Image (cartoon, helix red, strand yellow):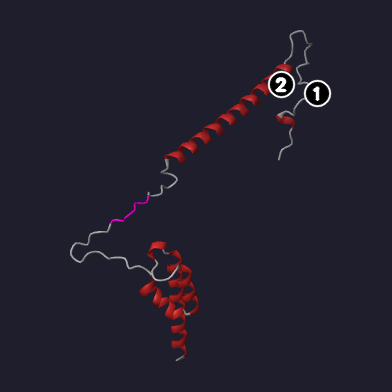
């Protein structure tokens, strides 16, 4: 007998939660007889009676398909269907522009690094009037940026 009471109590709670969710998510035009807050309070304070009352009298009945044809009812106001991000042309365009900007910035940094390295190599080249054995690279001056070989490995 105790199991039956527990089962009925759980069913009452589930019904009240479903009614409360239905009440709070209903459009303003679909609620009848009382304002939304009134229905929510009735469902909270009288869970069983309030839930049944909400489902019977509180929300507007939606007509089902016709018995003979099964034709679908067209909505009175047509909402635009939201596009998924990968279907939205504006979103795709913004991604392409961002990617292009990032690529250009990376390319610019590579070119800067290449120019810096070429200048560094030109400074280290041996001149024809230098004595043999002087082909060793020059030590970096204090103001020079560190070379690749001077950087510690991480």
Q: Which mark, residue 120?
A: 2
- Identified at 39% across, 77% down, the residue is 53
The vertical placement of 35 against 108, above or below, is: below
Q: Nearer the viewer, residue 37 or 134?
A: 37
Magenta stretch mostly in which secondary structure? loop
* Residue 27 visible: no
Give the residues drawn in magenta, as a range.
74-79
Q: Is residue 39 left or right of residue 70?
A: right
Q: Nearer the viewer, residue 9 or 113?
A: 9
The vertical placement of 30 against 11, above or below, is: above
Quadrant, the N terminus: bottom left
Secondary structure, mark 2, is: helix
Q: Which mark, residue 48?
A: none
Q: Nearer the viewer, residue 144 or 56?
A: 56
* Residue 132 x %, y %: 77, 13
* Residue 13 visible: yes
Disc 1: which residue = 141
- Identified at 42% across, 47% down, the residue is 84
* Residue 118 x %, y %: 67, 20
Q: Nearer the viewer, residue 47 or 123?
A: 47
**Distance in Å between CA atoms under marks 2 and 1:** 11 Å
- Identified at 49% across, 76% down, the residue is 44
């Amino acid at each position: 007998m105790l199991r039956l009471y527990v089962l009925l109590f759980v069913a009452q709670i589930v019904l009240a939660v479903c009614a409360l969710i239905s009440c709070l998510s209903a459009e303003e035009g679909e609620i009848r007889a009382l304002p939304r807050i009134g229905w929510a309070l009735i469902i909270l304070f009288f869970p069983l009676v309030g839930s049944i009352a909400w489902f019977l009298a509180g929300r507007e009945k939606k007509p089902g398909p016709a018995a003979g044809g099964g034709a679908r009812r067209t909505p009175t106001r047509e909402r635009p269907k939201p596009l998924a991000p990968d279907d939205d042309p504006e979103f795709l365009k913004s991604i392409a522009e961002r990617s292009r900007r990032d690529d250009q910035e990376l390319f610019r940094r590579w070119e800067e690094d290449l120019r810096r390295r070429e200048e560094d190599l030109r400074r280290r080249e041996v001149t024809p009037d230098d004595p043999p054995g002087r082909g060793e690279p020059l030590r970096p001056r204090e103001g020079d940026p560190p070379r690749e070989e001077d950087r510690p490995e991480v």
